[in-house]
Structures are given as structure tokens and as C-alpha cells.
Amino acid sequence: MSENLNQVSEELEVSAPVIDNSELDSNGLLKKRKKVSLDARKARAGYVFVLPFILGVVLIYLPILLDSIWFSMSSPDYATVPGDIVYDFVGFEYYIAAFTDSSGFTVSLVAGIQQLIFEVPAVIIFSLFIAVVLNQKMLGRAAFRAIFFLPVIVSTGIMETINASDFMSAQSQEGINDGSGQGGANEIISALDVEKLFASMKVGGELVTYVVSIVNDVYNIINYSGVQMLIFLAGLQSISPSIYEACRIDGATGWETFWKVTFPMISPMILVNGVYTVIDAFTRTENTMIKFIEKQAIGSTYKATAMSWIYFLVIMLIIAAIAAIASSFIFYQRRD
């Protein structure tokens, strides 16, 4: 009997869990383990993936940005020590000089902003229109999507360089004959006398100028709309088909469905595309301000650095204004 009791006690000792003292509270009771939620685990995984980018910004880009700010507020002194450069702190001298001298910085900045005001709405409206069309069920839909995105790929690398230098048109010196005697496909709207058509409709001259400039610049608008089109497509495909089915059952027309369902549901994508288009337009190689700053850098790198920071602050202010305006009509769907 005693042997059986000893055997049972040994089995209980083996099967009993080993409790660490760290798992006990001050009263000697077991502590309750906190369960980590799924959202918290996803957040931790997100930080792990973002960590290389954060380290790159802190260790590489942040020192470069600080040096750039220092250069924009410094002036080199070569006469102090032969063979060495001593920097004198001049504060905002270069920033003030960018607006007061006759270099043309203000004129180029205003011209760049005007070009942005004309270009951004046209790109967003065109990309939204094409995305809505390509989201319909039709034969060869994937091929059409690839065709509209193809200019984004073609306009990079050597093709972008050729387009920026206008090498092909410089070689031909002729352009495309559209029958108007003016030459060039970019002036086809003038050949069709669309300006006279708008004038006969008693439309304002500013609107006529805007429409004519947009149509004449349709080649660049298509080139700059590929990424925005894909973002809009992703937003359109995330809308549940049951919502459209409910609209059809209620008798809503396609126009009402677009403005009451589609447009509010993709309004966050409008903000994303607006910010992306602004940054893309301001940092493009053929941008007026980019060319001007590169030209100024040949004479004075420090002054050009100050102009670059002014340009950067202007971009941030425009993006903040777009975000503030868009926040008034953006609709965020609740997932709970």
C-alpha cells in the first residue's frame, strides 16, 4: 500500500506544472497573463517592417537635412585659413535675398504654382474618369488598364530625357500637319476653332483659356495619370458590390449612385492622389523651379540651398491646404 502511495505522489510531482516565483504576486497567487490583442500584434509587426526606413531616415537622411539647413544659413570664408573653409553664420540672409534680388526666383515660383493649379485638377479628374470606365465589366479590361498605365513606364529613363530635351521635334523641325497650317499636334484644338465655339456660348475667357490649355496638354496629362488611376481603381474595387445592388433595388440611377455612393467612398483616395500629384509635379525634372534652382546652384550653392528650402516649405503649405480642404468632404467607412 505504501509503495502505491509513493508511486502516485511521484506521478503527481511529475505532472504538476513548475511555477516560477516571477509569476506570483505579493500574496503568493498566480498572476493573470495579459492577452495581446490581434491589433496590437499587427501594430508590432508593422513597426518591425518600418524599422529599416526609420533607421535610414535617422542615421542617413536626418544628418544630411541638418547640414543642408546649416549651409543655407552659412557663408564660406576662404581667406581665414589657407586650404581650409570656415563658415560664417549669416542667418536668413540668403532667404531674404531670394525674394529681393533680381534673380527671378519669385517669378519662377509663381509660375510653378500657377502650373500646379492648372495641372492637378486635370490629372485627378482624368484619372478618376478613366478608373471608373476601366472598373466596368467589359472585354479586354486588363489590356486597357495596361495601355493607360504604359505611359508611366515609357516616360521614365531615356524616354524622359528625350522628352525633356525635345530632341525628336528639334530633329524634325516640322511636326504633324493637321491641316491648319500651324503644325504640331499640340495645337489641334486651335485648328478646330474650339475657342470660337466657347466664345459663342458666352463662356468666360478664363474658362476658355483653361480648357484650351488642358486639351493642348492632354499628352502630359495622360502620362502623369497612371499611378493615380491605379489608386482610384484600388479604391473602386474595395467598395462592396452589395451597396450597388441595394442602390439598383431602390431605383437609383447611375449618376445618383456615383455622387451618393462612389464619390464619398473613394474620397480618401482623392486626398492621396492630390498629395501625390502635387509632390510629383513639384519634383519633376522639367519643373520650372527645379530648373531655376539647378541653374542658381552653378553660381552659389548656398543660395540655391536656401531657395530649395523655401520651395520645400511652399510645397508643404500647399499640401496642408489641400488636406484641410479635402478633410471637409472625406468619408471614412467604419469597420466596426
Image: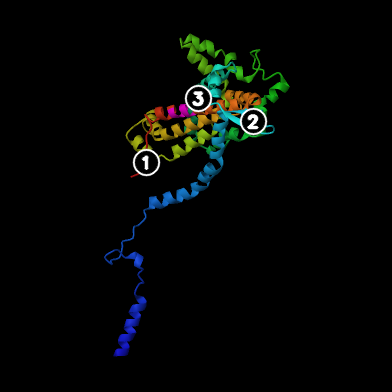
Q: Amino acid at mark 1?
A: Ser
Task: Tell me the quadrant of the picture where the C terminus can be found.
Answer: top left
Stretch in magenta: 314-320
Instruction: Place residue 10 in its image quadrant.
Output: bottom left
> How busy is the neighbourhood of tag 3: few (under 14 within 10 Å), some, or many (20 plus)?
many
Say whether marks 2 and 3 touch (CB < 8 Å): no
- The disc, 3 or 1, on the residue closer to the chain's N-terminal end is 3
| 333 to the left or right of 310 | left
**Image disc number at residue 122:** 3
Residue 158 at x, y percent in the picture: 67, 33
Instruction: Place residue 326 in its image quadrant.
Output: top left
- The disc, 2 or 3, on the residue closer to the chain's N-terminal end is 3
Q: Secondary structure at mark 2?
A: helix
Instruction: Place residue 8 in its image quadrant.
Output: bottom left
> How busy is the neighbourhood of tag 1: few (under 14 within 10 Å), some, or many (20 plus)?
few
Spatial separation of the CA atoms under disc 2 and disc 1: 43 Å
- Residue underneath mark 2: 160
Question: Measuring 32% from the left and 82% from the top, which residue is drawn there?
Answer: 9
- Residue underneath mark 1: 242
Q: Nearer the viewer, residue 134 or 184?
A: 184
